[in-house]
Amino acid sequence: MVLADQLATLLAVIVGAITSFTVTTLSDRSRFRREQARHWTDKKLEVYGAYLNAIKHMNQLSRRIAASRGIGDGRALKLGREKAHALLDDAENSRATASEMVALVGDATVVGAVRDLNREVWRLEWIARGLLQPNNEMWEACNQAYVRALNALHEGIRQELKIPGVFLPRSLERHPRPILPTADLPPSLDHS
């Protein structure tokens, strides 16, 4: 009996050790996977943010250079042609670098949306450089295509990263000047 009791105790210790080892190993693997997923989510947010900053800079620069050529209604950037083209070249280099990083970490939907947005910003760049000569309707159509592509990218990023909340796309309507209330302006802002 004593030997049987000792064997039962030894077997219980062995089973307990194996169970403890298995549970600890599975728990460590699960924690590692969560930490990796969190790391890649953070990295993707960083990469996507850098790309969005680069593409928006290129868009704003293209719009301001186009406005200096009398295209659109934006605030003109008063520069010589060579300086304006050098700024566009720098903006394009930043956009291209950021775009490559997105291609490395993004899913197929995000990478496809980035490619579409790149095409739309290039069209605005070509207008700014004088390679396309748009009328007002074509200019507005190019801007709306850019906004649609930007909205699609934001939606794709939100879906990929499972960002909670509702996506509110940018409006395609352009308002040249904001409408401000006049009745409730503080005395220091009322210039009438």
Image (cartoon, rainbow, N blue to C red):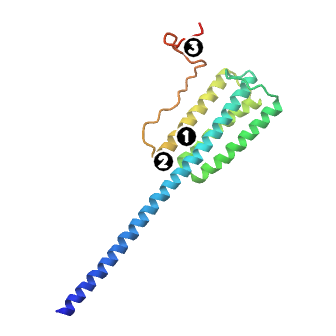
Q: Identify the element where label 1 is drawn.
A: helix
Asked if residue 53 is positioned above or below residue 27 in the image, the reply reads above
Q: Nearer the viewer, mark 3 or mark 2?
A: 3
Instruction: Tell me residue 49's x, y (percent).
Output: 58, 43
Report if residue 42 is visible in the image: yes
Q: Amino acid at mark 3?
A: Ser
Instruction: Tell me residue 149's x, y (percent).
Output: 57, 36
Circle 2 packing at 10 Å, graded few (<14), some (14-19), many (20+), is some
**Is 27 positioned to the left or the right of 140 in the image?**
left
Report if residue 111 is visible in the image: no
> Which residue position holds label 2?
161
Q: CA distance from mark 3 to mark 2?
A: 45 Å
Residue at screen point 57% across, 11% down: 190
Q: Are marks 3 and 2 in contact (CB under 8 Å)?
A: no
> Which residue position holds label 1?
153
Q: Identify the element where label 2 is drawn.
A: loop
Q: Are marks 1 and 3 in contact (CB under 8 Å)?
A: no
Image quadrant containing the C terminus:
top right
**Is 34 positioned to the left or the right of 63 in the image?**
left
Residue at screen point 54% across, 11% down: 187
> Which residue position holds label 3?
188
Residue at screen point 57% across, 47% down: 46
Image quadrant containing the N terminus:
bottom left
